[in-house]
Amino acid sequence: MADEESKPLLSTSPTETYQAVENNQNVEERSCFFRHKKVLIILLILFGWAVIIIALVVNFFVVAPAIPTPIGEKALKIMSLSVWGSPASFGTKDKEERMVAIGDYIRNHTDVDLYLLQELWMRPDHQTIKSALPSDYMMTAVGSLAPALCDGRVAPTFCSGLAVVSKYPLKEVSFTEYSAHGYIFYKDGEYWARKGTGRVRIETAKNYTVDIFLTSTCAFDYNTYYRQIQAAEFAETVSKSTADFVIGAGDFNIDPRTSETTYASVSKVLKDTRKEFLGKEHWLKDPKMATYGNKVNSYSYGASRLVYDYFWHRARHGHSVSVAQFSVPILKTRDGHSFSNHEAVQATFVLAKH
């Protein structure tokens, strides 16, 4: 009996009971902590994904890209004009009036994406046209498409006469000088000019690269030798283009019906835009489409009806260029003078990736 009375009523001491309860509470607290930690981690992961998704939405939908993404194809409207911009001592007429008219025309015809100008020799004339441009157009500087020694203040010495007016930003600008320039003892000034191939690269839509080439070759029939060399070098430069699409233009000073190799050299690497649009049977038959000696030209109307000014085009394999429009617009100043002794040519190209 005494032994039974000496036994504790509880199997464990109060201290042990307290410790057990405390241990159970610690376990529950740790379990609760881990549960909260897991929830927090999940919330952080979800928040991170939400930030990424919002950033993608803002980048692609709220902040529009600078260049639109095309659906199938993109049209490009271009005008090319040899402006007859030599000093009056070279026999040029009404030059100041005509330069003002050219600038006004560009300002009032913003449906044209690019203007490709040749024979723009003098800096004051370049500035006249540039000062008339709409704010969303840009123009190459005199030295951008000419050798560094280009004068253009007193005479066209060492200048190319090339300029580009563009609605699109110019991604690249380069100039390749011809190796032959005319005979030093001829009085036509060809030897002292530095003609060559100008190139600008534009991007008409996202991942649509277009190289625009322009030139002016030696004038006058007796310069056949130099003109043929220049045309061959133009074709060689063009053939190196890595752009998706290539457009060529310029005053080649030779009709395709002659026996010169000038036209043949270029047609080996580019398609003749006029010929493709008008067809082989009609591309040379209409005298109204003459770019030199056109009967409505106020300066060269007495000469033979000839084609001196061209557009050319090509596309890389897997792409295509089609011609939606080709014309020879008759452009006059307010006083009725032609813009130049040459007519302009204008074309709309449709560029497509397949």
Image (cartoon, rainbow, N blue to C red):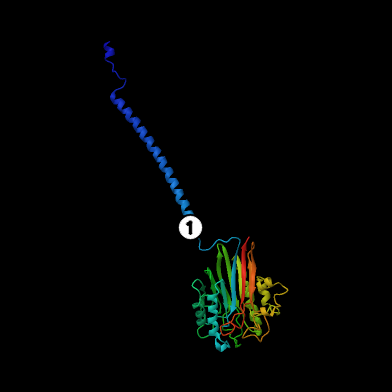
Q: Do we see residue 151 in this rendering?
A: no
Q: Please give the residue where the numbered disc 1 appears in the rendered image.
A: 62
Horizontal and vertical percent for residue 140? Answer: 52, 74
Q: Nearer the viewer, residue 287 or 48?
A: 287
Three-letter code for the amino acid on which mark 1 is drawn: Val
Q: Is residue 121 left or right of residue 50?
A: right
**Secondary structure of residue under mark 1:** helix
The 10 Å Cα crowd at callout 1, few under 14, some 14 to 19, many 20 or more, is few
In the depicted structure, whether residue 343 falls above or below residue 23: below
Q: Is residue 52 left or right of residue 290?
A: left
Horizontal and vertical percent for residue 123? Answer: 51, 81
Asked which quadrant contains residue 207, the reply is bottom right
Q: Nearer the viewer, residue 291 or 183?
A: 291
Q: Do we see residue 15 in this rendering?
A: yes
Residue extending farthest right? 281
Horizontal and vertical percent for residue 279? Answer: 70, 72
Image quadrant where one finds the N terminus: top left
Asked which quadrant contains residue 340, the reply is bottom right
Image quadrant where one finds the C terminus: bottom right
Horizontal and vertical percent for residue 274? Answer: 66, 73
In the depicted structure, whether residue 272 falls above or below residue 38: below
In the depicted structure, whether residue 78 falls above or below residue 333: above
Tally the numbered discs: 1
Q: Residue at x 37, y 35 (%)?
A: 30
In the depicted structure, whether residue 97 falls above or below residue 27: below
